[in-house]
Image: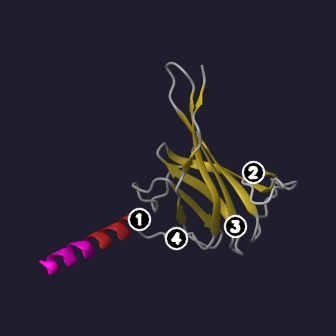
Amino acid sequence: MLRRILFFVCLFVALYTNAKEPAGLKNGKPYVKVLRATVQRTMPGRNTGVISNYDFIVVWTSKMPPASFFWRGQDGWLTCNVLKVHGAGKKNSLDYVPDKNGMDARINKGDTLEITPVPGGRFAIPSQIPGGAVNTLFFKTDQSGWLYYKTKLTQKPDVILP
């Protein structure tokens, strides 16, 4: 009986750990430190759908600069805008404002970035990205293949429009 229980526990652990990581992709945790990952839904009113707005604040921790970011959420594959930001001045604050060089093309190790997925992109999902990978930030550098960072989103209060 104990062997049977141990077998099922080991099987569960093996299946659970394999399901969390997209096959063939490298975990991007060494490249980014996520400070904030939020989603806020906007309820626009009658006869229109709910709009989900995602926002990520990350610190880039790699010497290699990122080449591109994409978000794979519940609503599909979205390209991302990336903006350099810095803290708003309050210690331990999660408020960030654009850096004076916010659109500078060069991202260096230690830069704080705001990553915002943009709906309506025309980029096809690369074949290396598994279909079941959702709530995941995908990115690559000039010298790497696709990297992923699975996020836990904090739900902001809904915005309800008349």
Q: Nearer the N terminus, badge 4 or badge 2?
A: 4
Specify few, some or many for label 1: CA neighbours under 10 Å numbering under 14, 14-19, or 20 or more. Answer: few
Q: Nearer the N terminus, badge 1 or badge 4?
A: 1
- SS at badge 4: strand
**Residue type, label 1:** Lys
Q: Which residue is drawn at 20% across and 77% down?
A: 7
Mark carried by residue 53? none
**Which of the two marks, 1 or 4, is nearer to us in this view?**
1
Give the magenta range: 1-11
**Is 2 in the magenta?**
yes
Residue 77 can be seen in this image: yes
Q: Nearer the N terminus, badge 2 or badge 1?
A: 1
Cβ–Cβ under 8 Å for marks 2 and 1: no
> Disc 1 marks which residue?
20
Q: Distance between the residues labelled 3 and 1?
A: 23 Å
- SS at badge 3: strand
Q: Which percent across, then down, holds residue 160?
A: 58, 27
**Residue type, label 4:** Asn
Question: Which secondary structure dominates the residues rendered in magenta?
Answer: helix
- Relative to 112, 150 lies left or right: left
